[in-house]
Image (cartoon, rainbow, N blue to C red):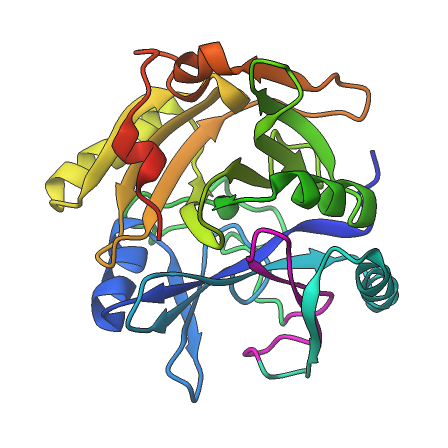
Amino acid sequence: MALTGVLRPGHIVLRVLDLDEAVRHYTQVIGLFETGRDDEGRVFLKAWDENDHHSVVLREAEQAGMDYFGWKVDSEQTLDDLAVKLEASGLVSDTRWAPEGEQLLTGRRFQFTIPTGHRMEIYATKKTLGCMTGYDNPDPWPDGLRGMAPSRFDHALLYGRDIDANLTLFRDVLGFNLTEQVVGPDRKFLIGVFLTCSNKAHDIAFIRSDEDNRLHHASFILGGWHEVLHAADIISKRDVSLDIGPTRHGITRGETIYFFDPSGNRNEVFSGGYIWYPDRPVITWHDTEIGRAIFYHDRKLNEAFLNVTT
């Protein structure tokens, strides 16, 4: 499958209450690398196997949460074409073009608000720093890794009311595919949708909620179950606030552990999952099996996990 249009998650911009504490968490606990700061005081970070200048941006604010989520597209022409489609869709609001350089070392970006109130943007250009192993005869991993050492920022799970309209927007306008869904008793009412723009189990997911514009978690990918267990050791060693895990999801089959940054934003590191192809049927989970869908091992819902968002 050739990747065209929207390529992948490009960056997530997180609000944090104490910037110094947050930088220590994301660099020393998670293991990202600081790549720059701008005149507004924002801090830019990347994982070791990411090519582009940054995938996580931290901004100090009075309330934790997500400012916006950026998607990289394959060309400037695609950026222009998708901007036209988004404007014409009737599914987005508050559109604007952000000029080149408004975000550090990033080209022009088309910003919009989706039906669940989350701010999104698409862009085609960002300065590249390269994978830390290089691209000529590379080793499998670089020296100098620290913390959990994820290879990339992977996805986010977001909460809001109109996930049906989000599904239409991402599938019919942006070209994503639905990989998994959670449905109610009539098998039509959507509780959750998991969407991919690549061949991963998901690049973004939405859960229906009574409150719009909420972040459930930002997630980073690890190499395997052993690395998830190592992340659990780091959480205890550094006295990080643990949410739940290590365990496995039924949805996406991912091996996972959840924890909180010092501001209360939930993080996940996970591994596993499956490869998605265009002819793969959508996986459906029914409301009677939500416990097993979310936490495959203990098969029980965890109210704090479901209800704590920023």
- The stretch in magenta equals 103-126
Say left or right for 306 vs 56.
Answer: left
Can residue 127 be seen from the camera position used here? yes
Quarter of the figure with residue 112: bottom right
Say left or right for 304 vs 92.
Answer: left
Can residue 230 be seen from the camera position used here? no
Q: Residue at x 70, y 76 (%)?
A: 96
Does the stretch in magenta take in 118?
yes
User: Which one is nearer the viewer's eye here, 308 or 146?
Assistant: 308
- Total marks shown come to 0
Q: Position of residue 219 (x, y in %)?
A: 44, 43
Q: Position of residue 290 (x, y in %)?
A: 44, 17
In this view, the residue farthest toward the bottom is 39
Q: Position of residue 212 (x, y in %)?
A: 49, 52
User: Which one is nearer the viewer's eye here, 190 or 200?
Assistant: 190
Does the stretch in magenta take in 68?
no
User: Which one is nearer the viewer's eye here, 250 or 76?
Assistant: 250
Q: Residue at x 33, y 24 (%)?
A: 226
Q: Residue at x 64, y 56 (%)?
A: 114
Q: Position of residue 278 (x, y in %)?
A: 80, 26
Q: Is the N terminus in the top left, top right, bottom left or bottom right quadrant?
A: top right
Quarter of the figure with residue 81: bottom right
